[in-house]
Image (cartoon, grey):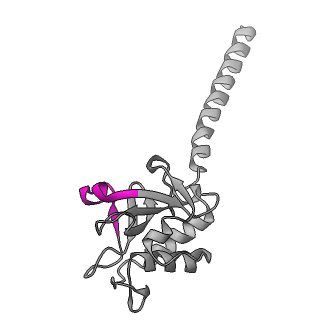
Amino acid sequence: MRKVLRALLLSTAFAFSANAVVAAEPARKAEEPSFLERYTNAAQDVILQGLKLVGVRYRLGGNDEDSGLDCSGFVRLVFKDSIGASLPRTAREMSEVGQTVDTSQLKPGDLVFFNTMRRTFSHVGIYLGDNHFLHAPRTGAEVRVESMENSYWVQRYNGARRIIEGN
């Protein structure tokens, strides 16, 4: 009888310890990095700086928050203020900086380019993740977030470049 009782106690203890291991597993999942933590600090800084400018009005040739920003002025300001990077003035010139990135490999902080004026690389924005980007769209509009799945942007997409090292 004692042998049976001892075996029962051991098997019960084993069962509880096995459950303890399983119960500990969700705690490890809770330690997984958040959406922003998955990317470099530089990319986080770029995204956060860009989001601060949502609502700033568009102005052709604009370079500052107070008077307004065009698409490349917006991108230049965000990269300068967030990580100290100096980018060229036009979207076309920006399309020649950094590394080419396949659409399937886009990461937050990458530059995305579009043909909005019947010429390639005439518009630029900052990729946010989940097929969304941040940009200064056009006269009469403001800096905003848009979906790259919108048919307008799908038809005009030209490619992407990675500026942030290690992203």
Task: Locate residue 14, reporting x and y percent.
Answer: 68, 23
Whole-percent x, y for residue 22 in the image: 60, 33
Within the magenta stretch, is there residue 147? yes
The correct choice, above or below, for 132 with respect to 141 in the image is above
Q: Vertical placement of 66 versus 94: above or below?
A: below
Q: In this view, does 44 lie above or below 90?
A: above
Residue 152 spot, x, y in % from top left: 25, 60
Membership of 54 in magenta stretch: no
- Identify the image quadrant of residue 71: bottom left
Farthest residue to the front: give it: 119
Q: In this view, does 113 lie to the left or right of 85?
A: left
- Residue at horizontal 65%, vertical 22%? 12
| Viewer-nearest residue: 81 or 16 | 81
Between 28 and 69, the one lying in front of the other is 69
Q: Tell me where the magenta segment starts and ends, as one range.
A: 145-158
How many discs appear?
A: 0
The image quarter containing residue 97 is: bottom right
Identify which residue is drawn at 38% across, 71% down: 135
The answer to which of 124 and 97 lies nearer the viewer is 97
